[in-house]
Image: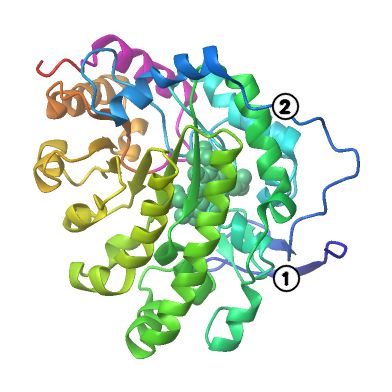
Amino acid sequence: MGPRIREAFQCSGRSGPLPGRAPVVAVVTLGPVDRPSGAGTVAPVSTSPVASRLASAPLLRAIRQEPGGRVPVWFMRQAGRSLPEYFAARGDGSILDAIGDPARATEITLQPVRRYGVDAAILFSDILTAVWAAGFGIDIVPGVGPCCKQPFRSADDLARLRRIDPPTDLWFQVETVRNLVAELGDVPLIGFAGAPFTLAAYLVEGRPSREYVHVKSLMMGDPDLWHRLCDRLADLAIATLTAQVEAGASAIQLFDSWVGALHPEHYRRFVAPHSARILATMADQGVPCIHFGINSGELLDQMAAPGVSCVGVDWRTPLASARARTGGRVALQGNLDPALLLAPWPAVEAEVRRVLADNAGHPGHIFNLGHGVLPATDPDTLNEVVRLVHAEGRADGGT
Ligand code: CP3
Protein backbone atom coordinates (compact mmCIF):
# COMPACT_ATOMS: atom_id res chain seq x y z
CA MET A 1 0.00 0.00 0.00
CA GLY A 2 1.33 3.43 -0.87
CA PRO A 3 1.97 6.27 1.51
CA ARG A 4 -0.94 7.65 3.42
CA ILE A 5 -2.77 10.23 1.39
CA ARG A 6 -4.34 13.05 3.31
CA GLU A 7 -6.46 15.86 2.10
CA ALA A 8 -8.18 18.60 4.04
CA PHE A 9 -11.84 19.15 3.37
CA GLN A 10 -14.82 20.49 5.15
CA CYS A 11 -17.86 18.45 6.07
CA SER A 12 -20.30 20.26 8.30
CA GLY A 13 -23.30 18.71 10.02
CA ARG A 14 -26.86 18.85 8.75
CA SER A 15 -27.31 22.39 9.97
CA GLY A 16 -23.69 23.51 9.66
CA PRO A 17 -21.18 24.17 12.43
CA LEU A 18 -22.64 25.24 15.74
CA PRO A 19 -22.68 29.02 16.29
CA GLY A 20 -19.62 30.20 18.13
CA ARG A 21 -17.58 27.16 17.16
CA ALA A 22 -14.88 27.04 14.56
CA PRO A 23 -15.99 25.26 11.40
CA VAL A 24 -15.13 21.60 11.43
CA VAL A 25 -12.15 20.99 9.20
CA ALA A 26 -11.40 17.34 8.89
CA VAL A 27 -8.41 15.49 7.69
CA VAL A 28 -9.71 12.81 5.38
CA THR A 29 -7.70 9.68 5.63
CA LEU A 30 -8.12 7.65 2.48
CA GLY A 31 -6.65 4.52 3.94
CA PRO A 32 -4.78 3.31 6.98
CA VAL A 33 -1.02 3.42 7.37
CA ASP A 34 1.23 0.53 6.46
CA ARG A 35 2.34 -1.65 9.31
CA PRO A 36 5.54 -0.16 10.72
CA SER A 37 8.48 -2.50 10.32
CA GLY A 38 9.35 -4.15 13.62
CA ALA A 39 5.93 -3.19 15.05
CA GLY A 40 5.22 -4.39 18.59
CA THR A 41 5.44 -8.02 19.47
CA VAL A 42 2.24 -9.91 18.93
CA ALA A 43 0.96 -11.63 22.03
CA PRO A 44 -0.16 -15.20 21.47
CA VAL A 45 -3.87 -15.94 21.88
CA SER A 46 -4.24 -17.23 25.43
CA THR A 47 -4.89 -20.92 25.94
CA SER A 48 -6.74 -23.32 28.21
CA PRO A 49 -7.06 -22.08 31.85
CA VAL A 50 -8.11 -18.61 30.83
CA ALA A 51 -10.17 -20.02 28.00
CA SER A 52 -12.19 -22.16 30.38
CA ARG A 53 -12.70 -19.23 32.80
CA LEU A 54 -13.75 -17.17 29.82
CA ALA A 55 -16.33 -19.77 28.80
CA SER A 56 -18.06 -19.29 32.16
CA ALA A 57 -17.86 -15.48 32.07
CA PRO A 58 -21.27 -13.93 32.92
CA LEU A 59 -21.57 -12.37 29.44
CA LEU A 60 -21.13 -15.68 27.65
CA ARG A 61 -23.38 -17.54 30.07
CA ALA A 62 -26.12 -14.96 29.49
CA ILE A 63 -25.71 -15.25 25.72
CA ARG A 64 -26.24 -19.00 26.11
CA GLN A 65 -29.27 -18.28 28.35
CA GLU A 66 -27.78 -20.31 31.20
CA PRO A 67 -29.52 -19.82 34.57
CA GLY A 68 -27.69 -18.65 37.69
CA GLY A 69 -24.88 -16.19 38.15
CA ARG A 70 -25.05 -12.44 37.90
CA VAL A 71 -26.58 -10.30 35.19
CA PRO A 72 -23.67 -9.07 33.06
CA VAL A 73 -23.46 -5.41 32.12
CA TRP A 74 -21.51 -3.41 29.56
CA PHE A 75 -22.32 -0.22 27.65
CA MET A 76 -22.31 0.47 23.94
CA ARG A 77 -19.84 3.31 23.36
CA GLN A 78 -18.38 2.71 26.81
CA ALA A 79 -14.97 3.66 25.41
CA GLY A 80 -14.84 7.24 24.30
CA ARG A 81 -16.55 10.50 24.40
CA SER A 82 -17.64 10.59 28.05
CA LEU A 83 -14.23 9.72 29.50
CA PRO A 84 -11.53 12.34 30.17
CA GLU A 85 -8.85 9.66 29.88
CA TYR A 86 -10.18 8.89 26.40
CA PHE A 87 -9.41 12.37 25.09
CA ALA A 88 -5.94 12.21 26.64
CA ALA A 89 -5.21 8.93 24.84
CA ARG A 90 -6.98 9.76 21.57
CA GLY A 91 -5.01 12.92 20.75
CA ASP A 92 -6.19 15.58 18.32
CA GLY A 93 -6.32 13.66 15.06
CA SER A 94 -9.15 11.73 13.49
CA ILE A 95 -10.51 8.88 15.58
CA LEU A 96 -9.31 6.68 12.71
CA ASP A 97 -5.72 7.59 13.58
CA ALA A 98 -6.24 6.26 17.12
CA ILE A 99 -7.94 3.14 15.75
CA GLY A 100 -4.95 2.56 13.45
CA ASP A 101 -2.51 2.64 16.37
CA PRO A 102 -2.64 -0.65 18.35
CA ALA A 103 -1.09 0.84 21.51
CA ARG A 104 -3.68 3.63 21.72
CA ALA A 105 -6.59 1.42 20.65
CA THR A 106 -5.63 -1.16 23.30
CA GLU A 107 -5.43 1.48 26.03
CA ILE A 108 -8.76 3.09 25.06
CA THR A 109 -10.51 -0.30 25.01
CA LEU A 110 -9.24 -1.07 28.51
CA GLN A 111 -10.18 2.29 30.06
CA PRO A 112 -13.88 1.53 30.72
CA VAL A 113 -13.08 -2.01 31.89
CA ARG A 114 -10.74 -0.60 34.54
CA ARG A 115 -13.03 2.26 35.49
CA TYR A 116 -16.40 0.53 35.59
CA GLY A 117 -15.66 -3.17 36.09
CA VAL A 118 -17.98 -4.02 33.20
CA ASP A 119 -18.41 -7.64 32.13
CA ALA A 120 -17.09 -7.14 28.60
CA ALA A 121 -14.68 -5.02 26.66
CA ILE A 122 -15.64 -3.81 23.21
CA LEU A 123 -12.86 -3.33 20.72
CA PHE A 124 -12.05 0.33 20.18
CA SER A 125 -12.69 0.71 16.48
CA ASP A 126 -15.59 1.91 14.35
CA ILE A 127 -18.11 0.37 11.99
CA LEU A 128 -16.43 2.36 9.19
CA THR A 129 -12.94 0.95 9.74
CA ALA A 130 -13.23 -1.77 7.09
CA VAL A 131 -14.59 0.69 4.52
CA TRP A 132 -11.74 3.04 5.35
CA ALA A 133 -9.25 0.19 5.01
CA ALA A 134 -10.78 -0.70 1.64
CA GLY A 135 -9.84 2.81 0.50
CA PHE A 136 -13.35 4.13 -0.14
CA GLY A 137 -12.43 7.65 1.01
CA ILE A 138 -14.24 8.27 4.26
CA ASP A 139 -13.49 10.08 7.49
CA ILE A 140 -15.20 10.43 10.86
CA VAL A 141 -15.53 14.11 11.53
CA PRO A 142 -15.57 15.03 15.23
CA GLY A 143 -19.02 16.20 16.26
CA VAL A 144 -20.54 15.23 12.89
CA GLY A 145 -19.86 11.56 12.22
CA PRO A 146 -18.84 9.62 9.13
CA CYS A 147 -18.56 11.71 5.95
CA CYS A 148 -17.36 10.95 2.44
CA LYS A 149 -16.61 13.53 -0.20
CA GLN A 150 -17.74 11.27 -3.03
CA PRO A 151 -20.80 9.27 -1.94
CA PHE A 152 -21.66 5.91 -3.51
CA ARG A 153 -24.08 6.60 -6.35
CA SER A 154 -23.30 4.28 -9.29
CA ALA A 155 -21.80 0.92 -10.22
CA ASP A 156 -18.47 2.68 -10.85
CA ASP A 157 -18.24 3.33 -7.12
CA LEU A 158 -17.99 -0.41 -6.43
CA ALA A 159 -14.39 -0.16 -7.60
CA ARG A 160 -13.68 2.00 -4.53
CA LEU A 161 -14.81 -0.83 -2.27
CA ARG A 162 -12.14 -3.37 -2.97
CA ARG A 163 -11.93 -6.60 -1.05
CA ILE A 164 -9.64 -6.46 1.95
CA ASP A 165 -6.97 -8.80 3.20
CA PRO A 166 -7.18 -8.43 7.00
CA PRO A 167 -3.58 -9.42 7.85
CA THR A 168 -2.42 -6.55 5.62
CA ASP A 169 -5.27 -4.04 5.57
CA LEU A 170 -6.44 -4.50 9.17
CA TRP A 171 -3.08 -5.45 10.71
CA PHE A 172 -3.59 -2.80 13.42
CA GLN A 173 -6.92 -4.31 14.44
CA VAL A 174 -5.57 -7.85 14.57
CA GLU A 175 -2.69 -6.64 16.73
CA THR A 176 -5.04 -4.68 19.00
CA VAL A 177 -7.26 -7.73 19.53
CA ARG A 178 -4.24 -9.91 20.35
CA ASN A 179 -2.92 -7.33 22.82
CA LEU A 180 -6.34 -7.11 24.44
CA VAL A 181 -6.90 -10.82 24.79
CA ALA A 182 -3.56 -11.04 26.60
CA GLU A 183 -4.49 -8.13 28.91
CA LEU A 184 -8.13 -8.95 29.61
CA GLY A 185 -7.75 -12.42 31.15
CA ASP A 186 -11.25 -13.71 31.83
CA VAL A 187 -13.11 -10.59 30.65
CA PRO A 188 -14.51 -11.33 27.18
CA LEU A 189 -13.70 -9.07 24.27
CA ILE A 190 -16.56 -8.24 21.90
CA GLY A 191 -15.54 -7.70 18.30
CA PHE A 192 -17.88 -5.94 15.91
CA ALA A 193 -18.65 -4.78 12.41
CA GLY A 194 -21.23 -2.61 10.70
CA ALA A 195 -24.12 -4.33 8.93
CA PRO A 196 -24.67 -3.63 5.23
CA PHE A 197 -27.70 -1.32 5.60
CA THR A 198 -26.11 0.98 8.17
CA LEU A 199 -22.80 1.10 6.30
CA ALA A 200 -24.62 1.75 3.01
CA ALA A 201 -26.53 4.57 4.69
CA TYR A 202 -23.23 6.41 5.28
CA LEU A 203 -21.69 5.54 1.93
CA VAL A 204 -24.73 6.46 -0.17
CA GLU A 205 -25.85 9.52 1.80
CA GLY A 206 -22.24 10.69 2.26
CA ARG A 207 -22.98 11.93 5.77
CA PRO A 208 -25.27 11.20 8.72
CA SER A 209 -28.90 11.39 7.62
CA ARG A 210 -32.38 11.37 9.06
CA GLU A 211 -34.45 10.59 5.98
CA TYR A 212 -32.20 8.19 4.02
CA VAL A 213 -33.55 9.56 0.76
CA HIS A 214 -30.61 8.50 -1.41
CA VAL A 215 -30.19 5.10 0.15
CA LYS A 216 -33.90 4.28 -0.18
CA SER A 217 -33.92 5.56 -3.77
CA LEU A 218 -31.02 3.27 -4.63
CA MET A 219 -32.67 0.31 -2.92
CA MET A 220 -35.98 0.76 -4.76
CA GLY A 221 -34.70 2.26 -8.01
CA ASP A 222 -31.78 -0.06 -8.74
CA PRO A 223 -32.18 -3.21 -6.66
CA ASP A 224 -29.46 -4.97 -8.61
CA LEU A 225 -26.83 -2.38 -7.70
CA TRP A 226 -28.19 -2.24 -4.15
CA HIS A 227 -27.67 -5.98 -3.72
CA ARG A 228 -24.18 -5.80 -5.26
CA LEU A 229 -23.28 -3.04 -2.81
CA CYS A 230 -24.65 -4.99 0.17
CA ASP A 231 -22.89 -8.12 -0.98
CA ARG A 232 -19.58 -6.26 -1.00
CA LEU A 233 -20.29 -4.75 2.43
CA ALA A 234 -21.21 -8.17 3.81
CA ASP A 235 -17.87 -9.52 2.51
CA LEU A 236 -16.08 -6.67 4.33
CA ALA A 237 -17.95 -7.44 7.56
CA ILE A 238 -17.17 -11.16 7.31
CA ALA A 239 -13.48 -10.47 6.66
CA THR A 240 -13.30 -8.04 9.60
CA LEU A 241 -15.17 -10.27 12.04
CA THR A 242 -13.29 -13.40 11.05
CA ALA A 243 -9.97 -11.63 11.65
CA GLN A 244 -11.19 -10.44 15.08
CA VAL A 245 -12.39 -13.90 16.06
CA GLU A 246 -9.21 -15.58 14.86
CA ALA A 247 -7.23 -13.08 16.95
CA GLY A 248 -9.27 -14.02 20.04
CA ALA A 249 -12.55 -12.05 20.29
CA SER A 250 -15.07 -14.05 22.37
CA ALA A 251 -18.29 -12.72 20.84
CA ILE A 252 -19.22 -10.42 18.00
CA GLN A 253 -21.86 -7.73 17.60
CA LEU A 254 -23.28 -6.77 14.23
CA PHE A 255 -24.35 -3.12 14.42
CA ASP A 256 -27.29 -2.22 12.19
CA SER A 257 -28.02 0.96 14.08
CA TRP A 258 -30.20 2.72 11.51
CA VAL A 259 -32.21 -0.23 10.22
CA GLY A 260 -35.29 0.93 12.14
CA ALA A 261 -35.82 3.38 9.26
CA LEU A 262 -37.21 0.51 7.18
CA HIS A 263 -40.61 -1.14 6.81
CA PRO A 264 -40.38 -4.82 7.85
CA GLU A 265 -41.17 -5.95 4.31
CA HIS A 266 -38.36 -3.84 2.87
CA TYR A 267 -36.04 -5.18 5.55
CA ARG A 268 -37.00 -8.71 4.50
CA ARG A 269 -36.36 -8.08 0.80
CA PHE A 270 -33.40 -5.76 0.76
CA VAL A 271 -31.43 -6.21 3.97
CA ALA A 272 -32.13 -9.43 5.86
CA PRO A 273 -30.43 -11.80 3.37
CA HIS A 274 -27.15 -9.88 3.57
CA SER A 275 -27.06 -9.59 7.37
CA ALA A 276 -28.16 -13.23 7.61
CA ARG A 277 -25.18 -14.30 5.48
CA ILE A 278 -22.78 -12.53 7.85
CA LEU A 279 -24.41 -13.94 10.96
CA ALA A 280 -24.63 -17.51 9.66
CA THR A 281 -21.00 -17.40 8.54
CA MET A 282 -19.85 -16.20 11.95
CA ALA A 283 -22.04 -18.68 13.83
CA ASP A 284 -20.43 -21.44 11.76
CA GLN A 285 -17.11 -20.30 13.23
CA GLY A 286 -18.56 -21.04 16.67
CA VAL A 287 -18.68 -17.46 17.94
CA PRO A 288 -21.80 -16.08 19.66
CA CYS A 289 -23.40 -13.29 17.63
CA ILE A 290 -25.30 -10.26 18.96
CA HIS A 291 -27.46 -8.40 16.43
CA PHE A 292 -28.30 -4.78 17.24
CA GLY A 293 -30.41 -2.00 15.78
CA ILE A 294 -32.31 0.92 17.18
CA ASN A 295 -35.98 1.61 16.58
CA SER A 296 -36.09 -2.03 15.56
CA GLY A 297 -39.02 -3.34 17.64
CA GLU A 298 -40.93 -4.27 14.46
CA LEU A 299 -37.90 -6.08 13.08
CA LEU A 300 -36.84 -8.08 16.12
CA ASP A 301 -38.35 -11.37 14.95
CA GLN A 302 -36.39 -11.14 11.68
CA MET A 303 -33.25 -9.94 13.42
CA ALA A 304 -33.28 -13.07 15.61
CA ALA A 305 -32.19 -14.92 12.47
CA PRO A 306 -30.48 -18.33 12.43
CA GLY A 307 -26.99 -17.91 13.91
CA VAL A 308 -28.03 -15.04 16.20
CA SER A 309 -27.60 -15.74 19.92
CA CYS A 310 -28.73 -12.38 21.25
CA VAL A 311 -30.57 -9.31 19.94
CA GLY A 312 -30.02 -5.75 21.13
CA VAL A 313 -33.25 -4.06 22.22
CA ASP A 314 -33.61 -0.30 22.29
CA TRP A 315 -35.48 1.52 25.05
CA ARG A 316 -38.74 1.81 23.08
CA THR A 317 -39.48 -1.92 23.33
CA PRO A 318 -40.07 -3.49 26.75
CA LEU A 319 -37.87 -6.55 27.28
CA ALA A 320 -40.93 -8.71 27.92
CA SER A 321 -42.38 -7.91 24.49
CA ALA A 322 -38.96 -8.32 22.84
CA ARG A 323 -38.82 -11.80 24.35
CA ALA A 324 -42.33 -12.57 23.10
CA ARG A 325 -41.50 -11.26 19.62
CA THR A 326 -38.40 -13.43 19.40
CA GLY A 327 -40.11 -16.47 20.91
CA GLY A 328 -37.42 -16.86 23.58
CA ARG A 329 -35.01 -18.16 20.91
CA VAL A 330 -32.33 -15.59 21.73
CA ALA A 331 -30.91 -13.70 24.69
CA LEU A 332 -31.72 -9.99 24.99
CA GLN A 333 -29.32 -7.09 25.44
CA GLY A 334 -30.53 -3.73 26.71
CA ASN A 335 -32.31 -1.50 27.27
CA LEU A 336 -31.95 1.57 29.49
CA ASP A 337 -32.60 4.84 27.66
CA PRO A 338 -29.14 6.49 27.49
CA ALA A 339 -30.68 9.96 27.85
CA LEU A 340 -32.04 9.02 31.27
CA LEU A 341 -28.49 8.61 32.60
CA LEU A 342 -28.39 12.39 32.74
CA ALA A 343 -31.32 12.50 35.19
CA PRO A 344 -30.74 12.72 38.96
CA TRP A 345 -29.53 9.43 40.50
CA PRO A 346 -32.85 8.41 42.15
CA ALA A 347 -34.50 8.45 38.71
CA VAL A 348 -31.62 6.49 37.16
CA GLU A 349 -31.77 3.97 39.97
CA ALA A 350 -35.50 3.48 39.50
CA GLU A 351 -35.01 2.96 35.76
CA VAL A 352 -32.25 0.39 36.27
CA ARG A 353 -34.55 -1.51 38.63
CA ARG A 354 -37.41 -1.22 36.15
CA VAL A 355 -35.30 -2.74 33.35
CA LEU A 356 -34.26 -5.59 35.65
CA ALA A 357 -37.87 -6.14 36.71
CA ASP A 358 -38.95 -6.09 33.07
CA ASN A 359 -36.58 -8.98 32.43
CA ALA A 360 -38.08 -10.80 35.44
CA GLY A 361 -34.98 -12.86 36.20
CA HIS A 362 -34.84 -14.52 32.79
CA PRO A 363 -31.37 -16.07 32.33
CA GLY A 364 -30.73 -14.56 28.89
CA HIS A 365 -30.28 -10.90 29.79
CA ILE A 366 -27.25 -8.68 29.21
CA PHE A 367 -27.83 -5.31 30.81
CA ASN A 368 -26.89 -2.47 28.47
CA LEU A 369 -28.26 0.80 27.18
CA GLY A 370 -30.75 0.97 24.33
CA HIS A 371 -28.07 2.85 22.34
CA GLY A 372 -24.59 4.28 23.01
CA VAL A 373 -23.41 6.33 25.99
CA LEU A 374 -24.06 10.02 25.33
CA PRO A 375 -21.01 12.32 25.57
CA ALA A 376 -22.42 14.33 28.50
CA THR A 377 -22.88 11.26 30.70
CA ASP A 378 -21.13 11.44 34.07
CA PRO A 379 -18.81 8.41 34.32
CA ASP A 380 -19.66 8.12 38.03
CA THR A 381 -23.27 7.41 37.07
CA LEU A 382 -22.16 4.51 34.88
CA ASN A 383 -20.10 3.22 37.79
CA GLU A 384 -23.18 3.26 40.01
CA VAL A 385 -25.26 1.51 37.35
CA VAL A 386 -22.72 -1.33 37.14
CA ARG A 387 -22.70 -1.62 40.93
CA LEU A 388 -26.49 -1.73 41.09
CA VAL A 389 -26.90 -4.29 38.29
CA HIS A 390 -24.28 -6.53 39.88
CA ALA A 391 -25.97 -6.22 43.28
CA GLU A 392 -29.59 -6.62 42.16
CA GLY A 393 -29.61 -8.47 38.84
CA ARG A 394 -30.80 -12.06 39.02
CA ALA A 395 -30.63 -14.65 36.27
CA ASP A 396 -32.33 -17.43 38.21
CA GLY A 397 -35.60 -17.63 36.32
CA GLY A 398 -37.77 -15.42 38.50
CA THR A 399 -37.47 -12.34 40.75
O1 CP3 B 1 -18.62 1.08 21.90
C1 CP3 B 1 -17.43 1.36 22.08
O2 CP3 B 1 -17.02 1.91 23.10
C2 CP3 B 1 -16.39 0.90 21.05
C3 CP3 B 1 -16.08 1.81 20.04
C4 CP3 B 1 -17.10 2.20 18.97
C5 CP3 B 1 -17.00 3.43 18.29
N1 CP3 B 1 -17.92 3.43 17.29
C6 CP3 B 1 -16.02 4.48 18.58
C7 CP3 B 1 -16.38 5.86 18.23
C8 CP3 B 1 -18.16 1.48 18.41
C9 CP3 B 1 -18.74 0.13 18.78
C10 CP3 B 1 -18.66 2.28 17.34
C11 CP3 B 1 -19.75 1.83 16.46
C12 CP3 B 1 -20.39 2.81 15.59
N2 CP3 B 1 -19.80 3.82 14.87
C13 CP3 B 1 -21.76 2.79 15.27
C14 CP3 B 1 -22.74 1.78 15.79
C15 CP3 B 1 -23.16 2.11 17.15
C16 CP3 B 1 -24.13 3.26 17.23
O3 CP3 B 1 -23.79 4.24 17.90
O4 CP3 B 1 -25.20 3.16 16.65
C17 CP3 B 1 -22.01 3.85 14.38
C18 CP3 B 1 -23.35 4.23 13.78
C19 CP3 B 1 -20.76 4.49 14.12
C20 CP3 B 1 -20.48 5.62 13.21
C21 CP3 B 1 -20.01 6.77 14.00
N3 CP3 B 1 -18.73 6.90 14.48
C22 CP3 B 1 -20.77 7.88 14.46
C23 CP3 B 1 -22.23 8.12 14.16
C24 CP3 B 1 -19.93 8.65 15.24
C25 CP3 B 1 -20.36 9.85 16.05
C26 CP3 B 1 -19.79 11.12 15.76
C27 CP3 B 1 -19.55 11.84 17.06
O5 CP3 B 1 -18.64 12.66 17.11
O6 CP3 B 1 -20.22 11.57 18.04
C28 CP3 B 1 -18.66 8.04 15.25
C29 CP3 B 1 -17.44 8.51 15.94
C30 CP3 B 1 -16.99 7.68 17.07
N4 CP3 B 1 -16.87 6.31 17.03
C31 CP3 B 1 -16.55 8.14 18.33
C32 CP3 B 1 -16.16 7.02 19.06
C33 CP3 B 1 -15.55 6.98 20.43
C34 CP3 B 1 -16.44 9.62 18.73
C35 CP3 B 1 -15.24 10.12 17.98
C36 CP3 B 1 -14.41 11.13 18.68
O7 CP3 B 1 -13.52 10.75 19.44
O8 CP3 B 1 -14.62 12.30 18.41
Front one among 61 and 113: 61
Residue placed at 17% from the left, 53% from the top?
A: 301
Q: Does dot 2 land on a helix, a strand or a loop?
A: loop
Relative to 150, 278 lies left or right: left
Q: Quadrant of the N terminus?
A: bottom right
Tag 1: residue type?
A: Phe
Q: Quadrant of residue 388?
A: top left
Front one among 261 and 166: 166
In the image, is residue 380 part of the stretch drawn in magenta? yes
- Above or below, 70 relative to 140: above
* Farthest-out residue, right: 37
Q: What span is in magenta?
A: 372-394
Instruction: Look at mark 2 in the image and give the residue it sits on.
Output: 43
Relative to 306, 22 lies left or right: right
- Above or below, 212 relative to 315: below
Q: Quadrant of residue 273?
A: bottom left
Instruction: Look at mark 1 in the image and give the residue it sits on.
Output: 9
Tag 2: residue type?
A: Ala
In the image, is residue 42 part of the stretch drawn in magenta? no
The answer to whether residue 117 is seen in the rendering is: no
